[in-house]
Amino acid sequence: MNTDHIVSSFDADLNRIESLVLEMGGLVEQQLLTCTKALKLGDRSLAKDVIRNDAKINALEAEVNQMSIELLALRQPMASDLRTVVMTLKIANHLERVGDYIKNMARRTNTITKADAFIGSVSTLTRMSAKVQVMINDALDAYNRRDPEAAEAVRGDDEDVDQMHNGLFRELLTYMMEDTRNISGCMHLLFIAKNIERMGDHAAEIAGETVYLVTGEWPTDKRVKGDRTSRMIFTPEELGEAE
């Protein structure tokens, strides 16, 4: 049996799978950039483009899954090779979930724009999105370069996204208290903000899985979760509302 040929074929298959995952990541980054632009400009056409293009991300994940299953069945990799295949599958799943959040963000953008609803706090949402875009890019770069230190830095960046989400939650509640006509638009913006916050979580998870892929050990420090919105209750006075 020509073991060199088997090893070479395995490496080629694995490289193809990893290339597909990086292609997924590039498409996810572009989708988020386009969706954020659609929200900022109130562009329904761009939002609809994002919704349609989500199918491309799903198709890439399906291809990654199929190729990975075949690789596991036919090559039966061991040790670090098995870890690479499994972690790559998990990373592809995270990217698909981010794509779903972007699609939901695009749908809400389309709804808000169509109804000409209140759309305050877009600048904060844009900053959140930009931060998450960087996190996704850095996480995938760390995965591609097998750099656990860079991956750890991405895990730490997620706290910044959480803090922006906390501030935005309070800001949008204030707008709703000031004028009930703002409520519908603000509710959609709150969901969009949550979508972006969850994207940051997935980027951090990709980074954590990269650490495990390279070192064989999960990060020892627990990732700081700064999102407190599920526990926030404000009185009108706290929101600055006059009695």
Image (cartoon, grey):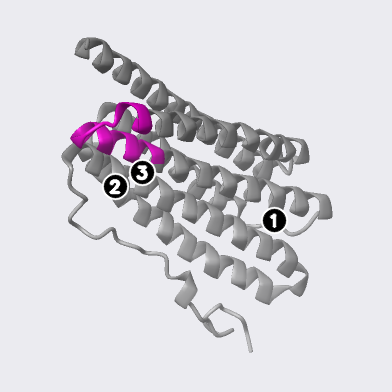
| Residue pointed to by mark 3 | 206
In-image side of 144 versus 192 (left or right)? left
Q: Which residue type does callout 3 highlight?
A: Ile
Give the Cα distance between marks 2 and 1: 35 Å
Residue plotted at (31% across, 20% down): 10
Labels 3 & 2 near each other (Cβ < 8 A): yes
Residue 119 is tagged as 1
SS for callout 2: helix
Give the Cα distance between marks 1 and 3: 31 Å
| Residue pointed to by mark 2 | 208
Q: Which residue type does callout 2 highlight?
A: Gly
N-terminal label among 1 and 3: 1
Could you say where residue 201 lies in the image, as x and y percent from the top left?
Answer: 41, 53
SS for callout 1: loop
How crowded pointer 3 is (Cα within 10 Å; few <14, some 14-19, many 20+) is rated as many
Give the Cα distance between marks 3 and 2: 5 Å
Q: How many marks?
A: 3
